[in-house]
Amino acid sequence: MVFNVALPGERIHGMTTPNQTGGSTVVQQSPEATHLEAPVWITIVWDDPVNLMSYVTHVFASYFGYPRAKAERLMLQVHQEGRSVVSEGGREEMERDATAMHGYGLWATVEQQS
Amino acid sequence: MTGFARTRDGIVARFDPVENKLLRSFADQIIDLLSFDEMVDDVLPDESDGTDPFTHWAAEMANQWTLDDSDPLVRRLFPNAYADDPIAAEEFRHFTMDEQRRAKVRDARVVAAALARSRDGKRPVKVPPDEVDAWLKTLATIRLALSVRLEVVDAETEEALHYLPDDDPRSFLASVYGWLAYCLESLLAVLAQESRN
């Protein structure tokens, strides 16, 4: 298992992280840098032809504790766009989330946010 | 009326004897598919107390023997968590698959036991709050298993199940698959009502 040793919430001094999708960019460290940008990982849930929309909504609300409206919005994104990012954080945390999604019969993957 | 309902005493499920038997049979099949404890017992020496390395090895070997990755159902129940990184994917499976497998067996056992207590559908099945998840997940697992058996791979093949002619050999399982969707919807509707109250 990978340990996430980075300090969350810290940014490299003076650098901006523009990104069309709104995520932050992981930047290579220069030797003089004193802060580490924590690599952000995301859990993606993918559409599948079997699971019911009501079920997927319930899983998002129940497991993540999202309000109903947000859970529905994410479910619709899965359904209409084929996938949705349902959580973000450290790698181990995302693996736990993906495992939980698999436990419910959903298909989820983990990747580093680009 | 079969399905789940909210009563004074909590959530109950009502199934007729045929439905009860069918559901129980599917739960048992999930248990059989995913259990390997019997196999481990066969290879363990009698004096093993379960803590020696041999036990661990036997368990790992049995795990690899019974869960066959070339089986599309195994692949669907234990999907790949790293789409583009086969090494990370393998590590992830190695660490998580056994616990996942055990959890599914535990949940299916909860459902099978609850159905058994209903005396073939003569009594309603009680679903206490701490068993709701087991029902949701087991119903979902059974639907996934059926979908693999029915070769559902996309929205089109799924849709086609609803329009099978009566003499199609898949039509019985397809109707069960549809009935299970109804069951799951009915449980979700009860839960949604409760969260609004």
Image (cartoon, grey):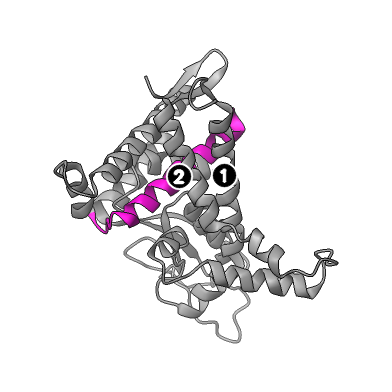
Note whether B177 is above or below B96 in the view shown.
Answer: above
Q: Are marks 1 and 2 on the same chain?
A: yes
Q: Which mark is residue B107?
A: 1
Q: Residue at x 50, y 39 (%)?
A: A62
Taking B124 as reference, is B83 left or right? Answer: left
Chain of the residue under label 2: B
**Magenta region, main secondary structure:** helix
Which picture quadrant has residue A95? bottom right
Could you tell me if the residues under marks 1 and 2 are in contact, i.e. CB atoms within 8 Å? no
> Residue B26, which numbered label?
2
Q: On the image, which quarter does residue B162 sit in?
A: top left
Amino acid bearing label 2: Phe
**Residue at the extreme top:** B8
Front-most of residues B117 and A30: B117
Where does the image place residue B172, in percent across and percent down from the top left? Answer: 27, 42
Q: Which residues are magenta?
A: B127-154
The image shows residue A57, relative to residue A10, as above or below, that is above
Residue in the image at 64% along x and 64% along y: B39
Q: Nearer the viewer, mark 1 or mark 2?
A: 2
Work out whether residue A3 can be spotted.
no
